[in-house]
């Protein structure tokens, strides 16, 4: 009997030790789950990022992390990222989980539309850095992760067509109400194919010049980058239009045809907020008063839901996250959006705009868009016919 008890105690000890050893062994395996080795390259036509994950021991699936540094060109304004605010990705932000069991090599494509939204057809310019970690849920009884892989990067160049599409223009047969092409800007959301010709609506024509406004909202920026007292003369949107936009959209010939125009900056017609000094601009926004100008084809009251004042965003601006309303259609049957005017709102912290229905708000909206980031930019300019 005494021998049997000793034998039982010995067996129990062996079982406990082996269990502890097995537990320690499992714990060691938790720590040593394999870290993936990866390679990345741009997918065809830069429609996304092609990620290859090499054979990885113990991997049941993978998490993909991406960081993004904007290209310092057309898509950046000062220290702020304006190409697509929905696409400012910090280091080690998870963008995709790949549920792929097994340990063999995997190749997947992370599409541009997954990173931004369905309206973005290719990668915006900039540097993309990818890291991956593997995980296993089944083998260890709970989800265990590897260390992040070494970072792999690709750089996408801006397909900037600053030279435009034409070296000469003949606008002699153009009349008020016509739509003309002049200059080029990104519009279809496919950065890979370069910029598209800009369409402009002719509001007025004389023997020496034509006054035009873009047919579509071409971009999405705040009236001013900071929330403080501002006028059209001092706002950052004026600077952007006459610098970044002007240089991106027009070639040397086209720049020579754009007239420097003296812009009258009237006070707000309802609230008497100060419009500021007159300015001289190549590119500018329409004013509150011009929105009731019947010679331009607009309704003569601000509150009227005027279809002629409605404007749709381009696909590029939709990709940037602008708000449009399917209840209000443009003349062409497209969903209309909000667009800025240069006149101040009820005070110098606000600016007037045209809303989706085609009415004009004199009260205005915050110049800095912390809360209202869906107002677009519809440029206007004067083309000199004698240049």
Image (tube, rainbow, N blue to C red):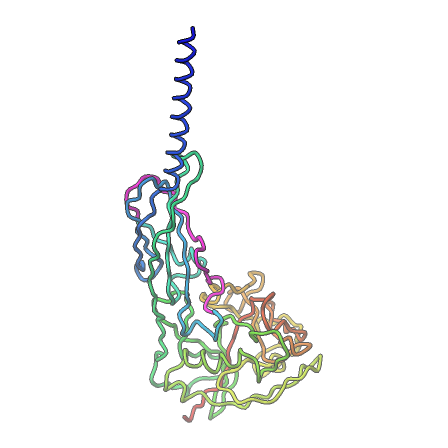
Residue lying farthest to the top in this orientation: 1
* Horizontal relation, residue 356 to residue 251: left or right: right
Looking at the image, which is closer to me, 210 or 58?
A: 58
The residue sitting at 33% across, 50% down in the picture is 108
Instruction: Estimate the x, y position of residue 161 in percent, counting from the top left.
Output: 35, 75
Instruction: Estimate the x, y position of residue 178 in percent, counting from the top left.
Output: 47, 79
The residue sitting at 41% across, 81% down in the picture is 247
237 magenta-colored: no
Q: Quadrant of the N terminus?
A: top left
Residue lying farthest to the right in this orientation: 271
* Vertical placement of residue 278 versus 320, above or below: below
* Vertical placement of residue 160 versus 86, above or below: below
Q: Determine the image quadrant of residue 323.
A: bottom right
Instruction: Estimate the x, y position of residue 133 in percent, counting from the top left.
Output: 38, 48
The residue sitting at 41% across, 29% down in the picture is 20
Q: Which stretch is magenta?
A: 82-106
Q: Quadrant of the C terminus?
A: bottom left
The residue sitting at 68% across, 74% down in the picture is 363
93 magenta-colored: yes
* Main SS class of the magenta portion in the image: loop
Q: Is residue 177 visible?
A: no
* Vertical placement of residue 237 versus 115, above or below: below
Looking at the image, which is closer to me, 352 or 347?
A: 347
Tally the marks: 0
Looking at the image, which is closer to me, 209 or 57?
A: 57
Q: Is residue 298 visible?
A: yes
Looking at the image, which is closer to me, 146 or 209?
A: 146
* Horizontal relation, residue 156 to residue 298: left or right: left
Instruction: Estimate the x, y position of residue 57 in percent, counting from the top left.
Output: 31, 41
Q: Determine the image quadrant of residue 9.
A: top left
* Vertical placement of residue 372 versus 210, above or below: above
């Amino acid at each position: 009997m005494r021998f049997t008890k000793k034998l039982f105690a010995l067996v129990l000890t062996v079982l406990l030790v082996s269990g502890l050893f097995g537990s320690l062994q499992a714990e060691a395996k938790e720590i040593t789950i394999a870290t993936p080795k990866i390679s990345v390259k741009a997918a065809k036509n830069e429609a996304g990022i092609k990620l290859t994950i090499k054979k990885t021991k113990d991997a049941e699936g993978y998490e993909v992390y991406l960081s993004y540094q904007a290209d310092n060109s057309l898509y950046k304004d000062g220290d702020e990222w304006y190409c697509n605010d929905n696409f400012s990705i910090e280091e080690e932000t998870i963008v995709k989980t790949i549920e792929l069991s097994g340990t063999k090599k995997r190749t997947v494509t992370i599409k541009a539309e997954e990173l931004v939204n369905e309206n973005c057809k290719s990668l915006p310019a900039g540097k993309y850095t990818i890291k991956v970690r593997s995980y296993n849920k089944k083998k260890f009884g709970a989800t265990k992760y590897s260390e992040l892989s070494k970072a792999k990067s690709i750089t996408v160049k801006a397909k900037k067509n600053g030279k435009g599409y034409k070296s000469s223009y003949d606008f002699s047969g153009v009349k008020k109400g016509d739509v003309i092409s002049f200059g080029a800007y990104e519009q279809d959301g496919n950065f890979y194919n370069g910029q598209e010709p800009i369409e402009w609506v002719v509001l007025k024509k004389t023997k020496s010049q034509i006054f035009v406004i873009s047919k579509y909202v071409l971009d999405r920026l705040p009236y001013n980058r900071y929330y403080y007292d501002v006028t059209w003369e001092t706002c950052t949107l004026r600077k952007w239009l006459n610098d970044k936009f002007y240089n991106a959209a027009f070639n040397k010939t086209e720049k020579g045809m754009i007239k420097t125009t003296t812009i009258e900056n009237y006070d707000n017609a309802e609230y008497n907020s100060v419009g500021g000094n007159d300015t001289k601009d190549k590119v500018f926004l329409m004013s509150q008063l011009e929105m009731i100008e019947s010679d331009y084809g607009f309704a003569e009251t601000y509150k009227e839901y005027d279809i002629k004042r409605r404007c749709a965003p381009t696909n590029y601006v939709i990709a940037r996250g602008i708000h449009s309303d399917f209840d209000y259609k443009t003349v062409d049957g497209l969903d209309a959006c909000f667009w800025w005017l240069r006149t101040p709102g009820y005070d110098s912290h606000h600016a007037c705009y045209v809303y989706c229905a085609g009415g004009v708000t004199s009260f205005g909206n915050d110049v800095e868009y912390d809360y209202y980031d869906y107002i677009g930019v519809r440029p206007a300019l004067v083309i000199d016919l004698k240049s």
